[in-house]
Image (cartoon, rainbow, N blue to C red):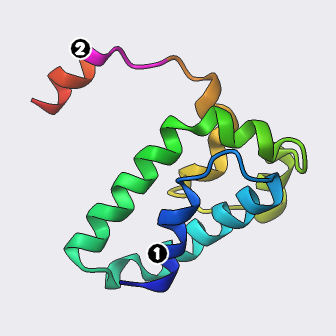
């Protein structure tokens, strides 16, 4: 398995680690964008599941991250690509939740 992916899979398991480590995780996820096309189908599935975990834990990650950096300012500084949604955890946390039944309808 891709080492960068392995590290990211571990990262998302610990949403309460320091904000510095969370920032490194977000940067690592951005590095994965560059190699995503080389990942196997199994690795892509693992990446998708890790992304799902990150999204579900966005509030915990953001709480720790906010102790070290303002994510909005960091976004402006780094200018992430449009598809790098993980740099928008602060926006994600404020977004209304999609009702479970609506999600199930969409996925059917």
* Position of residue 37 measured from the top left corner of the image (x, y, whole percent): 34, 79
Residue 8, compared with residue 50, is above or below; it is below
Residue 38, compared with residue 56, is above or below; it is below
Q: Secondary structure at mark 1?
A: helix
Is residue 46 shown left or right of residue 90? left
Q: Which residue is mark 1?
A: 6
Q: Quadrant of the C terminus?
A: top left
Q: Which residue is mark 2?
A: 101
Q: Which residues are magenta?
A: 97-101
What is the CA distance from the residue labelled 1 to the residue labelled 2?
32 Å
- Badge 1: how crowded within 10 Å, few (<14), some, or many (20+)? few
* Position of residue 16 measured from the top left corner of the image (x, y, whole percent): 70, 45
Query: Which mark is in front, 1 or 2?
Result: 1
**Corner quadrant of residue 104:** top left
- Badge 2: how crowded within 10 Å, few (<14), some, or many (20+)? few
Is residue 67 shown left or right of residue 22? right
Q: Quadrant of the N terminus?
A: bottom left
Q: Are marks 1 and 2 in contact (CB under 8 Å)?
A: no
* Position of residue 103 measured from the top left corner of the image (x, y, whole percent): 26, 24
Residue 36, compared with residue 82, is above or below; it is below
- Residue at (33% x, 85% y) in the render: 38
């Amino acid at each position: 398995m891709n080492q960068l992916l392995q590290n990211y899979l571990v990262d998302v398991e610990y949403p309460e680690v320091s904000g510095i480590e969370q920032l490194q995780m977000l940067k690592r996820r951005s590095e994965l964008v560059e190699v995503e096309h080389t990942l196997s189908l199994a690795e892509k599935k693992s990446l998708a599941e890790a992304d799902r975990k990150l999204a579900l834990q966005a509030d915990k990650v953001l709480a720790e991250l906010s102790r070290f950096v303002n994510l909005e300012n960091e976004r402006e500084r780094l200018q992430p690509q449009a598809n790098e949604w993980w740099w928008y955890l602060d926006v994600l946390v404020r977004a209304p939740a999609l009702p479970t039944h609506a999600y199930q309808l969409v996925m059917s």
